[in-house]
Image: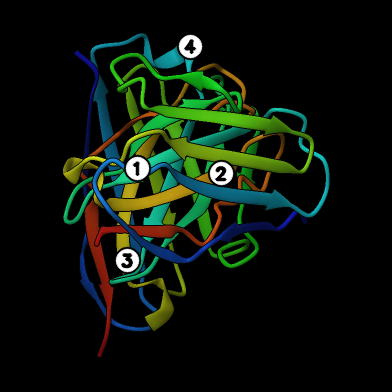
Amino acid sequence: DIQMTQSPSSLSASVGDRVTITCRASQGIRNFLAWYQQKPGKVPNVLIYAASTLQSGVPSRFSGSGSGTDFTLTISSLQPEDVASYYCQKYNSAPLTFGGGTKVEIK
Amino acid sequence: EVQLLESGGGLVQPGGSLRLSCAASGFTFSNYAMNWVRQAPGKGLEWVSAITNTGDSTYYADTVKGRFTISRDNSQNTLYLQMSSLRAEDTSVYYCVKARSGDIAAAGNYWGQGTLVTVSS
């Protein structure tokens, strides 16, 4: 099975900082990758699918890139409401594995 | 408006069984694949199972294979997860997740509020 490795597992950054989270697949998954945001105590929400397509209603400061095995989620200017855990998920074929998650905090 | 309402969670003893349901509304249920995703307390997300829009194909995580069964009733717009031989490590919030297409190779775009399953004696 394909493993999904996210890094870092946590980060602390200042408001306005550019934040980058990476997700690496152990084998190529083309662009079958989604990113989810889960705010504390809330249900996860999709941010990006097909590696780089922004879900409707998601702020444009979020962006995704990558293909094959290496993917990136970028927050161009971190806002207080972005405090959350972020997860990548591959969905090219079963199992639809999630990455371990990245907890983002404000410094 | 898409709505997914899970039910059936609760406290069950190790080795016991439970059936979760997910009532869907606001979209043509029979057109979309569906998933179950779980989250243990304080832990990350774990994909559990998926089913195609027709129900013809089902898929499972290795951790639940042989113990859990996913199914759907398109006439009732309802997704199910039959769980048996439950273990303490199955304790989680279980989410029902709608896929973007009828095939499982599609990201989830709507999540239910979740139902808590606690396996304990």
Picture quadrant of residue A5: bottom right
**Which residue: 61% across, 45% down?**
A96
* Kind of residue at disc 3: Ser
Left or right: A95 as drawn, with respect to B1: right
Q: Which residue is mark 3?
A: B92
The x, y position of residue B87, in whole percent, is 42, 80
Q: Disc 2 to disc 4, how far (Cα)?
A: 22 Å
Above or below: residue A53 compared with residue A5: above
* Kind of residue at disc 1: Gln
Q: Nearer the viewer, mark 2 or mark 4?
A: 2
Q: Which residue is mark 4?
A: B31
Left or right: A93 as drawn, with respect to A99: right
- Name the subunit of mark 3: B
Q: Which residue is mark 1?
A: A37
The x, y position of residue A85, in whole percent, is 34, 54
Labels 4 and 3 positioned on one and the same chain: yes
